[in-house]
Image (cartoon, rainbow, N blue to C red):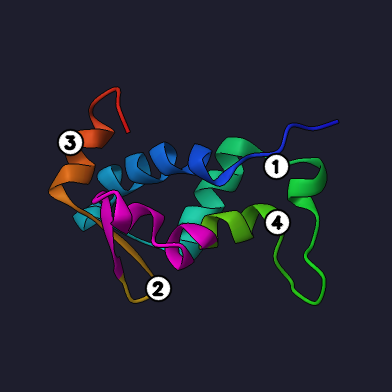
Amino acid sequence: MAKRVKEPELIRPTVELLDAAPNGEMQTTDIIVALEAAFRPKGEDNAILDGRSDTKFSQKVRNLKSHATLEKRGLAIRIPGGFRITPAGRAAARSARI
């Protein structure tokens, strides 16, 4: 059985993607593509949600925005369609702690 990815496991790689992105900004759809390439979701994470066209994995990435996960931690702010990294997020991306 494939190990399921949990939302907290997506925080560090998302912040690292933002840190490396031009202007520290990325659209959520681009984050999903990059994280799918990195995590290669399998099993239940790769299942299409009922009545939707996205997978459970992509919904977990979208939840970073809907749950304000990065904002609550001061790592990024929401922008239309995505995120912009904060100075605290840049520092966290370059440290061993998030």
Q: Amino acid at mark 2?
A: Gly
Q: Which residue is mark 2?
A: 81
Q: Dividing the picture into quarters, in which one does residue 5 lie?
A: top right
Q: In this rendering, would 39 be left or right of 85?
A: right
Q: Are marks 1 and 4 in contact (CB under 8 Å)?
A: yes
Vertical arrangement, residue 2 with respect to residue 10, above or below: above
C-alpha distance separating marks 2 and 3: 23 Å
Q: Which residue is mark 1?
A: 41
Vertical arrangement, residue 14 with respect to residue 84, above or below: above
Q: Which residue is mark 3?
A: 91
The residue tagged with tag 2: helix, strand or loop?
Answer: loop
Q: Earlier in the sequence, mark 2 or mark 1?
A: 1
Badge count: 4
Question: Which residue occupies the extreme left position in the image?
Answer: 87
Looking at the image, is mark 3 or mark 1 nearer the viewer? 3
C-alpha distance separating marks 1 and 4: 9 Å
Q: Which residue is mark 4?
A: 56
Vertical arrangement, residue 82 with respect to residue 16, above or below: below
Looking at the image, is mark 2 or mark 4 nearer the viewer? 4
Q: Amino acid at mark 3?
A: Ala
- Check disc 3: other Cα within 10 Å, few if <14, some if 14-19, many if 20+: some
The magenta region covers: 63-78
Q: Amino acid at mark 1?
A: Pro
C-alpha distance separating marks 2 and 1: 23 Å
Q: Earlier in the sequence, mark 2 or mark 4?
A: 4
The residue tagged with tag 3: helix, strand or loop?
Answer: helix
Looking at the picture, how far across and down is residue 59, in whole percent?
A: 62, 61
Q: Within the magenta stretch, is there residue 93? A: no
* Residue at (30, 27) in percent of width and height: 97
Q: Earlier in the sequence, mark 3 or mark 1?
A: 1
- Check disc 4: other Cα within 10 Å, few if <14, some if 14-19, many if 20+: many
